Image (cartoon, rainbow, N blue to C red):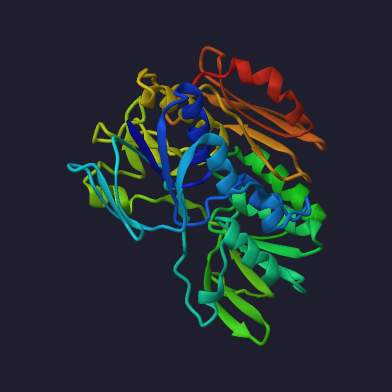
Amino acid sequence: MNTTIIGSGVAAWTLVRELRKADPEAEIRLITADSGDFYSKPMLSNALASGKTAETLVMTPAAKFAEQQKVELIANTTVNLVDASARSINSSNGVFSYDQLVLALGADTIKLPVDGNGAADVVSVNDLNDYSTFRKLLDGKKEVAVLGAGLIGCEFANDLLKADIHTTVFDLADRPLARLLPEQASLFMQNKLAEKGVGWKLGRTVSSITKTGAGYTLTDSTGEITEADLVLSAVGLRPRTELAKNTGLTVARGVVVNALGQTSNESIYALGDCAEYLGKFVLPYIMPVMQAARAMAQTLAGKPTEIKFPAMPVSIKTPDCPAVVNPPLPEHEGQWEITADENGVKALFKGKDGALLGMALLGDASKERQALTPLLPAMI
């Protein structure tokens, strides 16, 4: 039985490894639009501080990984169409048949609508090629404007400091990480990074970007002007769903899958950043990928196994303000209990019965992650 995986990110290669464990004789094919080299995507937003280049971020070249795992690697190949009824894939490298298909397509960076002749020069970092371009563009730069004060924006802002590059971070929200942290924790993060040199322009959007010599002039919605040598967009990710839509699969925010990771077509699965689990969760983090891949590998090997998500706190890679967050689920009712001092914030979201339903730990309080995580409820 042939299992074909489209994609080559952490989700795809983790599934390859887990499926090979579950079924040593499995016939596995991996089709990817790029080289397929294996690297950790979360490291892209803190690679400057660790001195990593695009080349040194590669953990295992695709050809070597494919050889180790006995995988048919079809690299640098674009998938144009999936015919679900015929179980075939039409690609730039020919037609391939499959018995089971896994979409591990990842996600695209969201691009904000911005006016001005410099808008097209805004860069995003979503893969190794992007990062390679970003590193080259940073040469000689001292001022970078970051669009987005979410997780990735904060991580890049802190990382750029380590390269002696000043950053100014813009966001429509009035505080950083507004979707993940309670207000007091957000402000703690904001102040700690500001002390190190991050500038914040919050409660506003960038309306236009104009080229000015070797740099750019940004005009925001308050009318204020900011000068920058480079503009980096980090406003979030949108699951890649076009191929799934064209295949006739059910799509909402992501490609909708059931507890087994199956899409609306029982022979097609979705995994990772492109998937929407049980019509509830889009989880662009490493731990959910690992959990889902382990379970899906068993299912693909003929042992149906439901995907379970335990509590999976997310570490925010801001070394000048270490942070761990596990937000309460939308259906959880309760309130934040917060203790704070100059060294950290410990925010615990508790239900009416006192049960711990979420947490945000910043600074010294982040050291309590291991003790508190077992007290959190599972996601699924």
Q: Residue furthest left?
A: 85
Image quadrant occupied by the C terminus: top left
Image quadrant occupied by the N terminus: top left
Residue at image point 49% right, 46% down: 8
Q: Locate residue 372, reporting x and y percent.
A: 66, 19
Vertical order, 4 against 115 (above or below): above
Residue 347 as seen in the image, left or right of residue 209: right
Question: Of 292 and 318, which appears nearest the observer?
Answer: 292
Question: Of 43 and 371, which appears nearest the observer?
Answer: 43
Q: Locate residue 191, reporting x and y percent.
A: 75, 49
Residue 296 as seen in the image, left or right of residue 360: left
Residue at image point 31% right, 53% down: 242
Residue at image point 69% right, 70% down: 136
Residue at image point 57% right, 19% down: 376
Q: Residue furthest bottom?
A: 213
Residue 175 is at least partly visible in this image: no
Residue 215 is at least partly visible in this image: yes
Question: Of 32 and 198, which appears nearest the observer?
Answer: 32
Q: Locate residue 71, reporting x and y percent.
A: 47, 39
- How many numbered marks have been drawn onto this rendered protein structure? 0
Q: Locate residue 5, reporting x and y percent.
A: 40, 41
Image quadrant in which you'd find residue 251: top left
